[in-house]
Amino acid sequence: MPTPAAETSALTAVEPDFPGPAVIIEEELRIPAESHTLEGFRRWIHSPDFPERGRIDFLDGDVEVDMSPEDLFTHGTAKACIGAVLHQMVADEDLGSVFIDRGRITSPEGAVSAEPDVVVVLWSSVEAGRVRLIPAASGKPRRYVELEGAPDLVVEVVSDSSRRKDLERLPRLYARAGIPELWQVDARGEELRFDIQSLASGAYRPQVPDLEGWVGSPVLGAEFRLLREPGRFNTWRYRLEHRS
């Protein structure tokens, strides 16, 4: 039986005491062989065996694992800044919900199951059936663990350990899933990159910023610009501005 491909720095042999074949990573993460299909992967993520740390995505038959620590000031603070502003715009006005980090989206059409850095889901998309809330296995009321379908907007902040996935693989699968808008942020270099891309004819097309760096979001009906400046103790500070 084939096993899923996994991007990782440590790969050990399968321990004989595990029930059935698997890939074992860093002696603590067991990837079941059946997770090379989207159905099998979803069974795994809903099971008690799915790990609570690290980012694990299903990308068109591959299981990609990133256990690297998050860079605090080229990833973590940028993500937090964007998520906070979008939450204030969307959730505080009861237009939808905003998820940071562990908001899993799954699309059978896109053959993808991932946890973007930020996810925006508008209630209008849930009402129209474009997004479905998947209940937790416990069956308890108001408990959900997954979004199935095409959320309205996803944000990916590029990391050293996932550059190709963030910039090449995920955009292609998100487009196939029908996600209307993709934000990409790359804060690793001297120049801060902030792109808003809209889905058109099955592919993402960048929104062109104006001379002051404002770029439009058709989904949110506003313009945004992401600014960065040196912070205290040799760190970075971010500010996401928006206007109608």
Image (cartoon, rainbow, N blue to C red):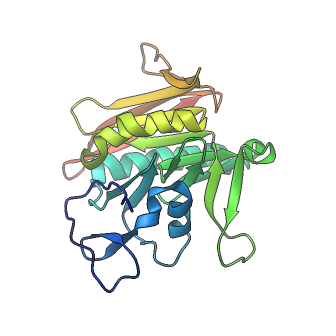
19 is higher (above) or lower (below) than 185: below
| Quadrant of residue 89 within the rendered picture | top right
Report x, y in % for residue 224. Answer: 51, 29
In the visual, does 57 lie left or right of 12? right
Work out whether residue 7 or residue 38 is closer to the camera in this orientation and state it: 38
Report x, y in % for residue 44. Answer: 50, 69
Number of on-image labels: 0
Work out whether residue 105 or residue 220 is closer to the camera in this orientation and state it: 105
Q: Is residue 80 visible?
A: no
Specify the farthest residue to the front.
1
204 is higher (above) or lower (below) than 25: above
| Quadrant of residue 137 within the rendered picture | bottom right
Report x, y in % for residue 113. Answer: 51, 52
What quarter of the picture does the C terminus occupy?
Answer: top right
Q: Is residue 119 visible?
A: yes
2 is higher (above) or lower (below) than 74: below
